[in-house]
Amino acid sequence: MKEFLRSMATRRWFLTTSGAATLALASSPSMAQPAAETPPLPIEHVDLTINGRPYALDLDPRTTLLDALREHLGFTGSKKGCDQGQCGACTIIVNGQRINSCLALAVMHDGDEITTIEGLAEEGVLHPMQAAFVRHDGFQCGYCTPGQICSAVALLSEHREGWPSYATADVETAPALTNAEIAERMSGNICRCSAYPNIVAAIREVAGEGSQ
Amino acid sequence: MNPFRYERASDVASACASAARPAAKFIAGGTNLVDLMKLQIEAPAQLVDITRLPLDRIEETAEGGLRIGALVSNSAAVADMRVRRRYPLLAQAILAGASTQLRNKATTGGNLLQRTRCPYFYDTTKPCNKRVPGSGCAALEGLNRMNAVLGVSDNCIAAHPSDMAVAMTALDAVVEAIAPNGSTRAIPIDELYRPPDDTPHIETVLESGELIGSVLLPPPPAGRQIYRKVRDRASFAFALVSVAAILDLDGERVRAARIAFGGLSYKPWRSAEAEAALVGAPATRAAFDAAGTAALKDARGYGHNDFKMPLARRTLRATLTQAAGLA
């Protein structure tokens, strides 16, 4: 596992570096718009707090939160799967709530507090949900995993606040996190490798709901 | 996505004034609009961000109902215990829609105004009178199993995708709208949506720049409330058919009933015919079937969606059987 994490860290460093190269390319003169006919694209200033640290960006308002994270800031942990809110690979936590970052315009989140998969581990120690996914083998290819884990972390706080789900027979109650409850609450995260049973087991363990 | 100008509205009046300009649109949760903009089905020249407006509260009304601000997220509406206690079918309907990630973003007003998921509305290589007026309707002869069977026209057979709106229709909700000149009006939710006729691109009675400010829920009527949704998979899918039912029994007879269907029409389909058939009838499966037959009397299938008529009748029977405690 340590080898795996080390290789992931190296890969992230590589992607961050090559991302910067791409940015430099995009602003080179050969890519500039002809000045005459098209008016200059409006640029909006956006301040974000990501994993506890402040970031300032000047963005085309078309930029989604996902693209701002990945392409502008190098937070490539959040994945682009479908880019239309169906797969959940881009799930991040904004002001305490999980959302699909692919359907959010970054400019609309000026001033918001964001947690991505990169912000869950503290001082090199995996978040309990990350550790449980490793222990229960809650992934195969791993592409959906950052979204699954961010989603699962938010799920637990929603459950603590008493939110019901469609699987809840009586919406006035907040039921135990059974397999059916977890499956319903995680239905916004698709896993093409179908690691679902192990994902549910990992979430149950962190929720303290036993193993059945 | 086409370029657009972005404006963060700081008050309702300026938001409405900005959105009244040509090719301007309000944006709140954005879960539908951003998706459509990526596909260039929507291409606004200006977006008016209303998310910082003070329309995010749920308030008691003097009559014992609730006023839900247009910016209350779907999640926040269901998190409110008053909604869950008084309007359980609304809570069930909201929870039946989308995923938690989307419900955290999606707003009450935006949910009402979301566009159809007809595959030909999304497929820009095919004709669609809703997307390109006058181009035709590919769904008529196409793969139309998700499409509508009631109240539509040969110009458009798109179905409204909302679950929340179906429950609100059974609850006689009222949409409170604010115009650019500051005037307000109350629109019964059943009158919010315009039939497609020969202008399916005009979907609601809202005017340019008119903003949904809130949705008023009258006090809950007597009776048991149930929302039942039938779909292709157990979660995170649009309804093939859904039923919002409120059934009030007097012994073994029906004293009052409210019935609204989802997935059948361009709007949540309130069935006065089914309700009339139920009132005074015994609470039996035969009476529930008769109500279903009355509700679907004028329905017309387009091939792939012919199954919706029997499915709607059976879903109504199952919902009412459960509401009557017979299941």
Image: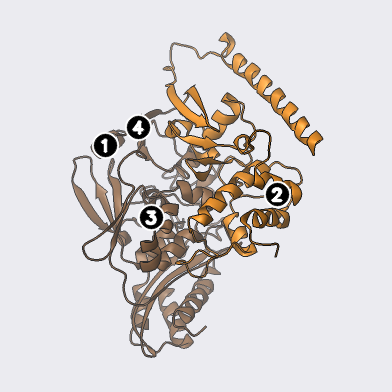
Mark number, residue B8: 4
- Visual hue assigned to chain A: orange
Q: Is residue B234 left or right of residue B189?
A: right
Mark 1 or 3: the one toward you:
1
Residue lying at 31% horizontally and 36% vertically, measured from the top left: B19
Q: Earlier in the sequence, mark 4 or mark 3?
A: 4
| Residue underneath mark 1 | B11
| Residue underneath mark 2 | A132
Mark number, residue B196: 3
**In this view of the protein, which residue sits in the foreground, B146 or A146?**
A146
Binning the other alpha carbons within 10 Å of mark 1 as few (below 14), some (14 to 19) or many (20 upward) gives few
Label 1 – label 2 distance at C-alpha: 46 Å
Residue at far top of view:
A29
Binning the other alpha carbons within 10 Å of mark 3 as few (below 14), some (14 to 19) or many (20 upward) gives many
Binning the other alpha carbons within 10 Å of mark 2 as few (below 14), some (14 to 19) or many (20 upward) gives many
Q: Secondary structure at mark 4?
A: strand
Label 3 – label 2 distance at C-alpha: 52 Å
Say if B97 sits above or below B121 in the image: below
Amino acid type of the residue that numbered disc 3 sits on in the rendered structure: Pro
Mark 3 or 2: the one toward you:
2
Chain under numbered label 1: B
Q: Secondary structure at mark 2?
A: helix
Say if B30 sits above or below B276 in the image: above
* Residue B168 seen: yes
Chain under numbered label 3: B
